[in-house]
Amino acid sequence: MRLDDTACSADFGGSGGFTAPPRACPVPEPADGLVPRFPHGAPPLPRAEVERLLARRPPGHEDVGALLAGLLRDLSAQRASHVPGVDARAATAVLDLLAALLTREPGAGPSPVETSRASTVARAQAFIERRLADPDLSPALVAAEHHVSVRHLQKLFEEQGLSVAGWIRRRRLERCRRDLADPARNDLPVRAVAFRWGFTSESHFNRAFRAAYGAPPATYRRRLRESRDPRTTS
């Protein structure tokens, strides 16, 4: 199995999510594996970390790699049966397994100090992921949980080209985007989606979502519905 980092619009939408089931992309002969393709920002990992880890060829025959490879094979075999709700959840599963696979790769042997700093960031991000729905989640809470100062935590995130608050907002927005793209949650109001993932102001959520994905959340959802409705296609 090989991982390609790309903005391949055939596999992903412009917002960084799958618009069709993930598929195994063709590779030059001789080909004996699967090649999932994804844009920067799709996995819930810092861009610099993704670039470093992609320098290695992850195993596709054991542990997390075997699970991911099996899922991709199944999705590739079932590509003809395109079901939007199932596709959205399958994409989430692929990205989660991909993140798990990448973070298990040992990389190029960073120094103990680099390992410690990267470990703190990874643990902080995992904590954030678990607490996204908590409206009280903040840089101060994350720092306290990991027994470091807010200033120190911010510095560690800045080394990855991130900020703590920016990462929290990004992950919340991505969770909201996935809910809005899921036909199974069409009856859930936009406001409820926002509150479900820790936003406390609907107007702030609308502005942040538009800045991230180029359209207000209600418009984003409506366009997806229209694109799935065969009556709107010529």
Image (cartoon, helix red, strand yellow):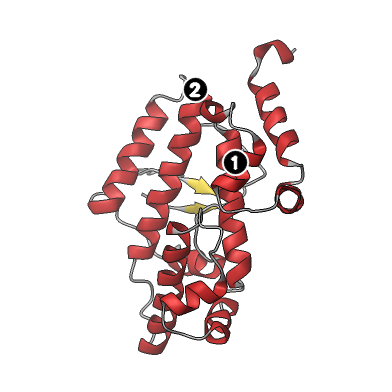
Q: Are marks 1 and 2 in contact (CB under 8 Å)?
A: no
Residue 53, how many percent across, how many down? 43, 66
Q: Is residue 38 placed above or below 44 in the rendered structure?
A: above
Q: Residue at point 43% right, 36% down?
A: 90
Q: Residue at point 33% right, 43% down?
A: 69
Q: Earlier in the sequence, mark 1 or mark 2?
A: 2
Left or right: residue 112 versus residue 138 is left
- Which quadrant of the rendered structure holds the C terminus? top right
Disc 1 packing (10 Å; few <14; some 14–19; many ≥20): many
Q: CA distance from mark 1 to mark 2?
A: 22 Å
Can you tell which of label 1 and label 2 is closer to the viewer? Answer: 1
Q: Is residue 156 placed above or below 171 in the rendered structure?
A: below
Q: Residue at point 37% right, 44% down?
A: 30
Left or right: residue 35 versus residue 190 is left
Residue 113, how many percent across, how many down? 40, 89
Dot 2 falls on a residue whose secondary structure is loop
User: Which residue, given by chain and number where applicable, does mark 2 sit on?
Assistant: 83
Q: Residue at point 58% right, 80% down?
A: 154
Left or right: residue 194 versus residue 220 is left
Disc 2 packing (10 Å; few <14; some 14–19; many ≥20): few
Q: Is residue 147 placed above or below 233 in the rendered structure?
A: below
| Residue 13 in view in this figure | no
Q: Amino acid at mark 1?
A: Val
Residue 108, how many percent across, how many down? 38, 76
Q: Amino acid at mark 2?
A: Val
User: Which residue, given by chain and number where applicable, does mark 1 sit on?
Assistant: 193
